[in-house]
Image (tube, rainbow, N blue to C red):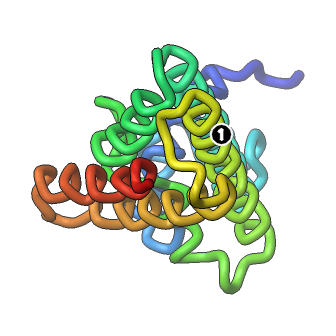
Amino acid sequence: MARSKEFEEKVVLDKAMKLFWEQGYEKTSMSDLVEHMGIHRRSLYDTFTDKHTLFLKAFDRFAERTNSRLAAGVKESATAEDAMKFLFKYMIFGDEDTPPGCMLVNSAAELAVRDMEVDVKTRAGFSDTERLIKEIVVWGQEKGEFTTAIEADDLAQVLHNSLVGLRVLTRTSTPKEKLERIAELSMYILKKK
């Protein structure tokens, strides 16, 4: 007779996601995962197959949560400038219950060069973020908030690059005040006439 699961899959997946996010793929052992997720090793293998599959599912969970949070924050913004400020603030401070930095950026730096599945997922994640930035830029250009002297695609690429850099710096002891100044200067390009 098959045993029923004694855990909520999304709950334990969130725990795995945070551990991978904090420690990275290589540094996270199966023993770490079993302990942190609070499930038996056999249940982990039965549900997620292996460490790599679990990592990919945790990565998808990260993308789902982050994309949802970013979309909601942008939708709640009254102006394109507010939306862009929200993006920068979110990249610097994140959510209260998450590790610093970004699982997508961390995974790209650690694994993408040698793991095709991670490369595909990180490139897709970067594309999604850049697409969101472009939508905000176009909104701001249409409302006269942002410059039209630079194409929306080009602005989105530059701002995305700045956001990725900020996500890396948030993993260090760099003061948040410095990161906020970088964000302000990055946004300056949007106003340049």
Left or right: 181, with 116 as reference point: left
Q: Which residue occupies the extreme bottom position in the image?
A: 114
- 70 shown above or below 182: above
Question: Is residue 141 visible to us here?
Answer: yes
* Disc 1 packing (10 Å; few <14; some 14–19; many ≥20): many
Q: Is residue 170 above or below residue 60?
A: below
The percent position of residue 52, horizontal first and vertical second, equals 70, 63
In the rendered structure, the answer to whether residue 157 lies left or right of residue 32 reads: right
Quadrant where the image shows the C terminus:
bottom left
Q: Is residue 186 left or right of residue 49?
A: left
Q: Residue at x 30, y 47 (%)?
A: 92
Image coordinates of residue 151 in percent, x first then y, are: 66, 58
- Between 131 and 143, the residue placed more toward the observer is 143
Q: Secondary structure at mark 1?
A: helix
- Splitting the image into 4 quarters, where does residue 44 fall? top right
Quick check: can you spot residue 24? no
Residue at label 1? 138
Image point 76% across, 19% down: which residue?
4
Number of on-image labels? 1
- Residue 6 is drawn in which quadrant? top right
Q: Nearer the viewer, residue 83 or 106?
A: 83
What amino acid is labelled 1 in the image? Val
Please give the name of the residue rendered at 74% of the width and 46% of the height, measured from the top-left corner: 48
Q: Residue at x 71, y 56 (%)?
A: 127
Vertical placement of residue 2 versus 177, above or below: above
Please provide percent x and percent y for residue 150.
59, 60
Residue that sits furthest to the right in the current view: 1
Quarter of the image for the N terminus: give it: top right
Most extreme residue toward the front is 193
